[in-house]
Image: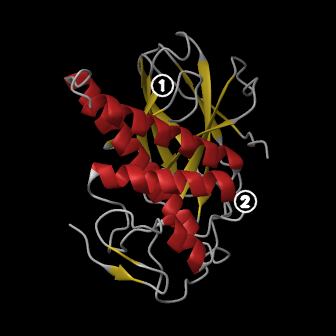
Amino acid sequence: MVVEVQPRLITVDARGEARGTRWRVSGRCAVAGGAGACGVWPMRKDFFPDRETDMLSWTANFAQKLASDYAALHVSAEVAQAYVDRQAEFAEAYRVAQAPETRTSLAVARKNECRRVIEQFSRGLARQIGGNLAVTDDQRFSLGLNIRKSAVRKIAAPDTGPTVQVMQVVGATAELRLCDPGRSDGRARPGGAASATIFVAVGQDRRGPSEPWRFLTMTNQTSLKIYFGNAYPPGTRVWLMARWNNRRGESSSDGIATYACLGEGGPSLGASPLRVAA
């Protein structure tokens, strides 16, 4: 399954799970280029590295910290594991694309797709973790994130989650829009919303899904396309729901769920006031 967040792509597996540097001197060490001897990165205006070799090191460190300290970083275990999986996919795709015996145009395209996925996922989590006042500067530094010079103003997450609108379904691709319930015709996020977390479940009953909700992806876009590939057969009713997140990692209440009937052309709309399981 592939989730496309315009204009980027996020890869999710078949089980339906979303898939030139300055010096910095600190009290602990000074580094340049990629990761230094003490495992930290130079703090540029944009924290995410430009070179793919540096991306591998940065994301590997980020994944390791999430896996071991997700609770202290106020990230759910499910989101942390999803990031670890996406980072492993990027590392493997990079290895395949670099090896002369396996380097093909398809391998390079796969590597580029995985790179876009991990970058978007990293930026979403960086906004959440970086804006959480409960996360210390030492924790941000160990993750390779920039440290804010001024205090973060406390902005609460929106009270109500977004409405997921299915704009169109063509084959196995669903085009979605996340809307503030009070502004269904607008694309802007409401005040306090830095990103959204999207959940997915399957259920043929119009009243709601028949299986537990699962994390699909995080996005800072309000328009996106989800390509389910061969994960579900044609005619499957796939339910989608979202929550707004503020920069401190706090979430809104659950939004209104919508289903998309795969394999059908044209709009496929449905809504039910469901809630994501805790």
Q: Nearer the viewer, residue 181 or 199?
A: 199
Q: Give the crowd class for mark 1: few <14, some 14-19, many >=20 residues within 10 Å.
A: many
Within the image, what quadrant is residue 89 found in?
top left
Residue 72 falls left or right of residue 171: right
Element at badge 1? Answer: loop
Q: Residue furthest front?
A: 37
Label 2 vs label 1, nearer the camera: 2
Residue 28 falls left or right of residue 17: left
In the rendered image, residue 93, in percent from the top left (x then y), is placed at 36, 32
Can you say whether 250 is above or below 111 in the image?
below
In the rendered image, residue 75, in percent from the top left (x then y), is placed at 66, 57
User: What number is the disc on residue 85?
Assistant: none
Q: Which residue occupies 48% across, 25% down? A: 1
Residue highlighted by disc 2: 71
Q: Residue furthest top?
A: 234
Can you say whether 234 is above or below 248 in the image?
above
Element at badge 2? Answer: loop
Q: Amino acid at mark 1?
A: Met
Q: Nearer the viewer, residue 210 or 38?
A: 38
Residue 193 visible in the displayed image? no
Asked if disc 2 and disc 1 are in contact, CB closer than 8 Å, the reply is no
Within the image, what quadrant is residue 140 found in?
bottom right
Can you say whether 190 is above or below 79 in the image?
below
Residue 267 falls left or right of residue 97: right
Residue highlighted by disc 1: 1
Q: Give the crowd class for mark 2: few <14, some 14-19, many >=20 residues within 10 Å.
A: few
Q: Amino acid at mark 2?
A: Ala
Q: CA distance from mark 2 to mark 1?
A: 28 Å
Can you say whether 250 is above or below 29 in the image?
above
